[in-house]
Every structure is written in structure tokens, then in C-alpha cells.
Amino acid sequence: TEPGLNNAGTTAIGSITQALAPTSVTFKSPVLSRDIELAGPLLLELYASSSAVDTAFNVEVLEESTLLQVPEPGGQLPTFLNPELSPSMETLTANNLQTVSTGKLKASARTLASALGADNQPDYAFNGVNPIAVARYYRYDIALHPVAWRFSAGNRIVLRISQTEDASLNG
């Protein structure tokens, strides 16, 4: 089986690889050895605490591909305009991130009206504010937009969780 995958249909994305900012964390899978298809509604079950009485989470599932560019010496420019490449500069790479799905949830709006349904999507109650206690861990069921996506072999699956900057959620 693919490293990081299990037979239950869930994916272990890996370990924390970088922090984009103090209020975000990014997980990356190993490079995929084969294509992986993802279809249907998505749900992130997140356990988190906060140093504030309310916060909002933004979740992104991304596909990271590496673009490999090999500069051609001489190209179509006159020789005096071509840069001299050192041996360490023979190939250049850049990462390309493509958004697969996103979801948001305000911590105080986490109350569910009922248990998760057959489609594994939360039914939020939206019947008032349910504040959180500072430094206490809570479960957050964050719905992401349904998708039909094929992650390509050689790419990575990226999960980014951050504090949202959406003013309607952080009010």
C-alpha cells in the first residue's frame, strides 16, 4: 500500500513540515508513488485548543507539484545575455500549489444539531454562541467542499490549517 494510507479509507498525511505563521500549520504527504482519487464530501475532525475565547479555522487541501526547469545554455538570446550557470544551478525547481477543497468553521459555532449523517457531513445547530474555554481541547468537525480530484503520482497532498482572516467568522 501507499505510505501514509490505511485500509479504512483515511489518510495519514505525515508530520508537520513547516509553519507558515504562528497561527497556521501545514502537513505534507510523502511524494505519491501512484495516482490517488478523492471523491465526495470531505470532513476534517480536528482537536485543538486556543488561547482566545473564540477563533475560526480555515482548512485547505492542496496538491503540490514540483516544476522542474532545465535552462538551456545558449537559448535564443545572444550569448552575452545568457547567464553563466554554476554546476549547482543546472536545474531549477519551483513548487506549484493547486487548491483541491476548502472549509471554515468558527469555534463558537461548532455545536452540531445531530450526529454526523450517512454523508459524513456535520449539521451545525447555529442556535447561539457556544464559547470555548482557553487552553481546553475541543473536537471540531469541519466540513470541506465536496470534490472529485485525482492527485498525480510524483506530487504531494498538502493539508493547511490556519486561523481564518474572514471578518464574518472572526467577529
Image (cartoon, rainbow, N blue to C red):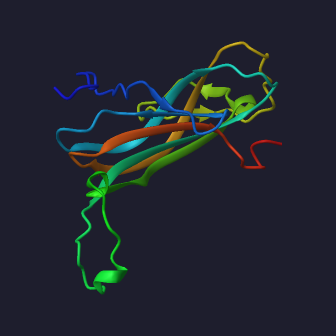
Which residue is drawn at the image coordinates 74% and 14% (left, top)?
Answer: 135
Number of marks in the image?
0
Which residue is drawn at the image coordinates 79% and 16% (left, top)?
Answer: 133
Position of 72 compared to 140: left or right?
A: left
Q: Position of residue 132 (x, y in %)?
A: 77, 21
The single residue placed furthest to the top in the displayed view is: 136
Position of 87 compared to 61: left or right?
A: left
Residue 71 location, quadrant? bottom left
Q: Nearer the viewer, residue 19 or 161?
A: 19
Position of 108 compared to 100: left or right?
A: right
Which residue is drawn at the image coordinates 24% and 63% (left, top)?
Answer: 70
Judge whether 75 appears above or below 120 on screen.
below
Position of 44 compared to 80: left or right?
A: right
Look at the image and tell me in which quarter the C terminus lies: top right
Q: Position of residue 140 (x, y in %)?
A: 60, 26
Q: Nearer the viewer, residue 22 or 134?
A: 22
Judge whether 58 appears above or below 137 on screen.
below
